[in-house]
Image (spheres, coloured by chain):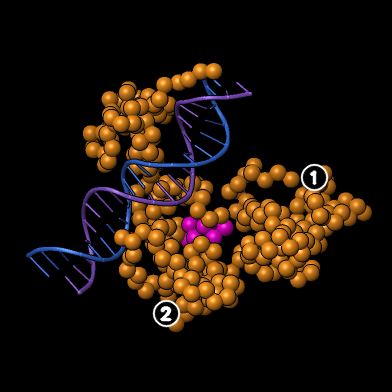
Chain colours: A orange, B blue, C purple
DNA sequence: AAGGACACCAACCGCTGGATA
DNA sequence: TTATCCAGCGGTTGGTGTCCT
């Protein structure tokens, strides 16, 4: 068993804002040595900083491919759509936006987009209208979330926008509620079982006919606990053709060599997996190699 | 004009999984 | 096999400029 020395003496390294001189040292070092072991950078570049801090300064600010411009409406739309699908996975979202870091995306979300959605009457976590949440969960007082940081109880200007040509645009206040409802409409790409069956390949393949109702985690938690179904029968079918995997509780259609599962019997864990697959259909390039069937 | 509140963002903190000795 | 380091990630916060009263 070996032990490597710590990257730096954390109690004696410089913290806080970077100076132009420090930036120049990082840039000069990367220009001559490239990006490698960041723990060696402070020593070799003559910086009294932690290697981790050097890496962050480079990736979030000094990298030459960063554009340092404000966000365009198209970029904001991308962030909103991806956040709706995958949540706060900022690095994955940032990969869809060249020249923008995950830190930029995160900051822009926390300072601008989250408030815009709230102002539109949309819950920034679920991307559902607060009115729908209220009807889903009953009368919950004060459901609209507030910033947890007291000093960040920001002013909230009335900002309304809608989707036009897949972009967010400003709009008149009377259409606010309508826009909110349109904005959160699920955009899952549902594969049609009949249409796709003619092009089925011999390889394992998954078809998902999504339930028509919104995805609500609590429904499945209750279902798991009570071992019963909360959805209407026949609201969805999960077909896994040629799969050799075992799926507890799934009905096997041996004639078709497939598994047909009424959505009513889908457990919580299976629902998570199904939701992930929905994400893959929505953003097929995002999680390449993540899903294996 | 001044002080407080707000808005923004750079940087830090802590956690996690993979790599390594 | 185990202990530790390191890169990457998301959450949080400190500092500063701007706006409002």
- A17 relative to A279, above or below: above
Q: CA distance from mark 1 to mark 2?
A: 52 Å
Q: Chain letter of disc 2?
A: A
Residue A218 part of the magenta segment = no
Q: Which residue occupies 58% across, 75% down?
A: A138
Q: Which residue is mark 2?
A: A173
Q: Chain letter of disc 1?
A: A
Span of residues in magenta = A77-85
Q: Is residue A165 visible?
A: no
Residue A84 part of the magenta segment = yes
Q: Which residue occupies 85% across, 53% down?
A: A258
- In the image, A120 versus A26, the foreground residue is A120
- In the image, A110 versus A147, the foreground residue is A147
Badge 1 element: loop
Q: Which residue is mark 1?
A: A245
Mark positioned earlier in the residue sequence (1 or 2): 2
Q: Main secondary structure of the magenta part?
A: helix
Q: Could you say where residue A18 lies in the image, as x and y percent from the top left?
A: 27, 39
Badge 2 element: helix
Q: Could you say where residue A107 lies in the image, as x and y percent from the top left?
A: 39, 53
Mark 1 or mark 2, whichever is nearer to me: 1
């Amino acid at each position: 068993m070996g032990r490597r020395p710590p990257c730096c003496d954390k109690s004696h390294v410089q913290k806080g804002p970077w100076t132009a001189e420090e930036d120049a040292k990082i840039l000069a070092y990367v220009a001559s040595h490239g990006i490698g072991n960041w723990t060696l950078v402070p020593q070799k570049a003559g910086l009294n900083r932690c290697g981790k801090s050097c890496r962050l300064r480079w990736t979030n600010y000094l990298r030459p491919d960063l554009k340092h411009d404000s966000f365009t409406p198209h970029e904001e739309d991308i962030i909103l759509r991806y956040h709706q699908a995958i949540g706060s996975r900022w690095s994955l979202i940032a990969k869809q936006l060249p020249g923008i870091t995950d830190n930029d995306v995160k900051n822009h979300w926390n300072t601008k987009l989250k408030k815009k959605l709230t102002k539109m009457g949309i819950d920034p976590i679920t991307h559902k209208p607060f009115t729908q949440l209220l009807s889903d969960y009953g009368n919950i007082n004060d459901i609209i979330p507030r910033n947890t940081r007291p000093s960040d109880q920001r002013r909230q200007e009335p900002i309304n926008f809608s989707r036009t040509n897949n972009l967010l645009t400003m709009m008149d206040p009377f259409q606010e509620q309508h826009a909110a409802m349109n904005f959160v409409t699920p955009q899952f790409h549902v594969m049609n079982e009949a249409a796709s069956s003619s092009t089925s390949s011999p390889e394992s393949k998954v078809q998902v006919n999504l339930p028509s109702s919104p995805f609500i985690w609590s429904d499945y938690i209750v279902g798991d606990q009570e071992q019963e179904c909360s959805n209407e029968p026949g609201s969805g079918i999960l077909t896994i053709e040629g799969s050799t995997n075992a799926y507890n509780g799934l009905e096997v259609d041996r004639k078709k060599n497939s598994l047909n599962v009424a959505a009513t019997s889908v457990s919580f864990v299976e629902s998570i997996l199904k939701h992930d697959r929905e994400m893959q259909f929505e953003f097929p390039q995002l999680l390449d190699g993540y899903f294996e069937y």
